[in-house]
Image: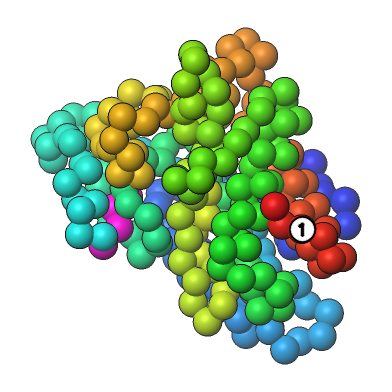
Amino acid sequence: MRPVDDPIIRVTDLGRMDYARAYERQAALNEAVLARRDEPGSSPGELLFVEHDPVITLTRRPAAAEHVLASEELLAHRGVALTQTNRGGDVTYHGPGQLVAYPILDLKRLRLGIHDHVRLLEASVIDALGAFGVQGSRDPEATGVWVEHGGANAKICAIGIRVRRWVTMHGLAINVRPDLSHFDLIVPCGLHGRAVTSLDRVLGDAAPSMDQVKDELARAINARLRDHGAGGSVA
């Protein structure tokens, strides 16, 4: 990864890591960001990048369990773990070839509401995709980022967050070149009949590398935070 010029928040690349270990890193950073809230000149947040081992994450939403379509035996055969998570949203898949970003941000210091935070993440992803000639968009009925492919809108980025004492956890997942067949094991985000895609499927041989996507997303998130601090819109 290239370093970000004049970053608002520091970026740490965890490489490939299982979901539980990455959650421990998030929780520790959440505490650290909260502890330095009143320290003048300290950073208002951190940004973690990671690729997870194959895992389906399931929220406590009552209907979420119904959106896991595969049996435990099939999941084990496919090498996909199943775990509960305390983020918002429904059910989703993480795995190699997917860039997961966990912004641990002090919304109080950044003067961001929860809705603003989600919109800022969506806008940052749209900015990053645009660097590769891919036009991302929002869906007013479904959080995340979508692209037109094959004559229909398909989800390329899922978003799910948690906020504790106005410091965020969890975040977003961009499909760069994951095994898209793993999404057939679930109803992604609980959205029936909605397609999932990836940069690899949209761009083919022109698809960027994982490091290129990391560079653009780190730049985009920091740029959006900088613009917001200067009085700009998060949209």
As shown in the figure, which amino acid type bears the numbered disc 1? Ser
Give the residue displayed 81% in from the left and 47% down from the top.
3
- Residue 45's spot in the image, x, y percent? 68, 68
First to last magenta residue range: 56-60
Query: Magenta stretch mostly in which secondary structure?
Result: strand
Q: Please tell me whether residue 148 is drawn above or below residue 44 in the rendered image.
A: above
**Looking at this view, is 175 or 61 the one in front?**
61
Q: Mark 1 Cα within 10 Å, few/some/many (few <14, many 20+)?
A: few
- Specify whether 209 is left or right of 143: right
Give the residue displayed 47% in from the left and 33% down from the top.
155
Give the residue displayed 62% in from the left and 33% down from the top.
136
Residue 188: image quadrant is top left
- Residue 56's spot in the image, x, y percent? 31, 44
Q: Which residue lies furthest to the bottom in this view?
A: 38
Query: Is residue 160 shown to the viewer in this render?
Result: yes
* Image quadrant occupied by the N terminus: top right
Residue 59 magenta? yes
- Residue 161's spot in the image, x, y percent? 48, 60
- Specify whether 123 is left or right of 16: right
Query: Is residue 16 shown to the viewer in this render?
Result: no
- Residue 46's spot in the image, x, y percent? 66, 64
Q: Please tell me whether residue 60 is drawn above or below residue 112 in the rendered image.
A: above
Residue 168 magenta? no
- Residue where numbered disc 1 is placed: 233
- Specify whether 203 is left or right of 27: right
Q: Please tell me whether residue 64 is drawn above or below residue 180 in the rendered image.
A: below
**Looking at this view, is 116 or 212 the one in front?**
116
Give the residue displayed 57% in from the left and 57% down from the top.
118
Residue 59: image quadrant is bottom left
- The tally of labels here is 1
Helix, strand or loop for disc 1:
loop
